[in-house]
Every structure is written in structure tokens, then in C-alpha cells.
Image: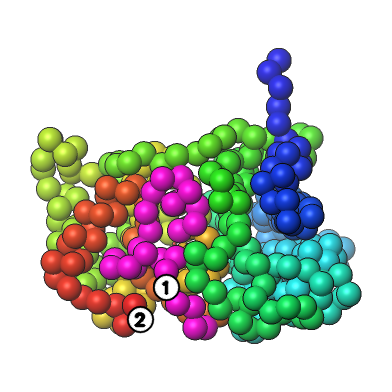
Amino acid sequence: MSRVTTLAEFIVEKQTDFPYAQGELSRLLTAIRLAAKIVNREVNKAGLVDILGAVGGENVQGEEQQKLDVFANERFINALENQGVVCGVASEENEDFIPFHSDMAQQSKYVVAMDPLDGSSNIDVNVSIGTIFSIFRRVTDHGPAQLEDFLQKGLEQVAAGYVIYGSSTMLVYSTGNGVNGFTLDSSIGVFCLSHPKMRIPETGKIYSINEGNYVHFPQGVKEYLKYCQDHDPATNRPYTARYIGSLVADFHRNLIKGGIYIYPGTTKNPNGKLRLLYECDPLAFLIEQAGGRASNGFKRIMELDATELHQRTPMFIGSTKMVEEAEAFMAKYQEVPARS
Ligand code: AHM
Ligand code: MG
């Protein structure tokens, strides 16, 4: 039997990449790993809990049912707070960031921005969902986290990753030295290295976008979609459309197979829907680490200024050549997004 590398072993091995971190980043990743397993356990029984909780909204223990995204948020925050590995967390679920006050937390070097359960509208229909996280080194000296610790450019990320709760559960992350994917062996509760050194194909055949919003799209996106659907065997067109509506799942598929995911600005929402700090920046970090590209149609995602915790941005992300093609259409029709 070939030797299996567990995520725990891998994190310790890679600790030497960050000699200045004195194990802090490793402990942080360990906290995320633990929370991911707990959330995975709940996600897997989501349908069952719904049935049990259908009468009066309580489960068999008489506990009030919690929405899974709230549960995931609490688990990740608790894991990070209990380990004292970050001085604060910003989450999609909380309007303000949460500063931590323990002695250890106040001394720690990092903050985490996260979407604890992305695509949660898909839970009820048994479609893959995910957790996305981004790790920054704090800019303040010590004490509980401050807003400026979070409002950093994506370029400043120390690490980023996601967990996909799908047909199997995977944790995919990067500390800036390539991207590695670990699949949870649920029989032993251990994440095992299954996708070492992930690379996105330079080009692909898949485009992912919510075409239902077509009428509101900028002209550049409309023209690019026409291009995707044109018949041209030399460039493998027409491409194929795949859209789950669960960002992590759409991203994960395109990372492995090659493709482009677009959530553009629209006439109704010029900055699109996705959030810069905990959805776009971490996935941009990963895609670049895997050899791909991410922009708002004009500018690299990781170079965008962060001015608000829940700021939105259009996003074009995936195989380098496909993103460049889409950007060329955007440039041709020059519709610069509201925030650039
Ligand atoms: P959420 O953070 O409220 O779950 O919303 C984010 C989700 C992404 O997972 C997905 O890619 C996108 O919203 C889908 O949006 P739409 O339904 O507009 O296509
Ligand atoms: Mg989300």
C-alpha cells in the first residue's frame, strides 16, 4: 500500500516554509481543519435533521434547530477563538468583525476572513456547498483585531483555502507555495492528500455564469457569451455551460477541468454579488497559485483596494486564456465597474 500523507502531517512538514511563524499558522490551519470536520458531520445529516425538526422546529433532544450557516459560523469562530491563533475574525454572517480578547489571541499575528457556509441555499436540495477562508498577517501591533487588519489587498494574503462538502469532502489550500487538496476519509475522520500540486489547465471548455441575468449583463459579457457559444472547431467552441450556483463547487470543478467562472456587475448591481474579502480574494489567491487568473474584468482581483468588510466586486476567474479572452471583450466595450 502506498504511503498516505495526512493533512496534519502535511501542515507540520510545511511549517518550515514559515520559520518566522513559530507554528502559529500551523495551529491556525489545524483549527480550520477541526471546524471543517465538525461542519461536515452536520452537513451530512442535514436532510435527516430537517425531517426530525419539521414539527415545531426542534430536534429529538428538544434543542432548537439552528440554521446550518449559523452553526458553521459558530463552529469556525469557536475553533479559532479557542485555539488563540488569531486576534479576530470577519465573517459573511456578522456585520462587524469579531475581535478576540484572550492574552494569546491579542499576541497572535493573524486574522481570518471567511464565508463559513457559501451557497447555503443549496443545503435543502443536497447540492455541494463550501467554506471559504482567507488568512492575513495583522497590520496592528498587538491587542484585539482592528478594522485595518482586515482591510488589506488580496496580495497580502498569507494563506487561503476552501472546504467543499460534496460527494466527498475536500479541503484545498495554499500558503503561497502551490495548491494542495485533501480528501476526508470519513471512516477514520482524516483528511488525506489526494490532489497534490493542483494546476488549472491553461484553457478549458467550461463557462459558468448565471445566464438568467443576461438582460442585465454588460455588453462585454454578452459578447463574450456569444463567443463561447459560437461554432469554431479550431478553438474547441462552442464551450459547454456548467453552473451550480454554489461558488466553491463551480470553482472546484473548473480548477480541476479548466474553465471560467463569471459573476459580473449588472445594471441592477454594478459590483455584482460576490464579496471581495472572503469569497473573491481567497479564490483569486488559489487560482493564481494554481496557474490561473482572476480579475474584475479589468483589474486583478488581488490588487483591488478593500474599503469595507462586505464589499462586493465582479469576478472573472479560471483558466488564464479564458479569463484573458473575457477581459478582451470587456476592454472592447469598456464598461468599467463602479468600484475599480
Ligand atoms: P451566499 O454567500 O449568500 O451563499 O451567495 C453566494 C452564492 C455563490 O455560492 C454562488 O456562486 C452565487 O451566490 C450564486 O448567485 P446567483 O444565484 O445569483 O447565481
Ligand atoms: Mg457566500
Q: How is the image coloured?
A: rainbow
Disc 2 designates what residue? Answer: 339
Q: Residue at x 60, y 59 (%)?
A: 158
Q: Which residue is drawn at 70% across and 64% down?
A: 72
Q: Give the range drawn in magenta.
A: 284-308
Disc 1 designates what residue? Answer: 304
- Dots 1, 2 in contact, CB < 8 A: yes
The answer for how far apart the CA atoms under marks 1 and 2 are is 9 Å
Asked whether the viewer can see residue 248, the reply is yes
Left or right of residue 316: residue 112: right
Residue nearest the observer in this picture, 322 or 40: 322
| Residue 25 % position (x, y) | 73, 56
Residue type marked 1: Leu
Occupied quadrant, residue 9: top right
- Give the label, 1 or 2, closer to the camera: 1
Residue type marked 2: Arg
Tell whether circle 1 marks a residue whose Cβ is less than 8 angstroms from ligand 2. no
Residue nearest the observer in this picture, 230 or 2: 2
How many numbered badges does the structure rendering display?
2
Secondary element at image label 2:
loop
| Residue 255 % position (x, y) | 43, 45
Bin the neighbour count of mark 2 within 10 Å (Cα to Cα): few under 14, some 14-19, many 20 and up.
few
Q: Does the magenta stretch include residue 250?
A: no
Tell whether circle 2 marks a residue whose Cβ is less than 8 angstroms from ligand 1. no
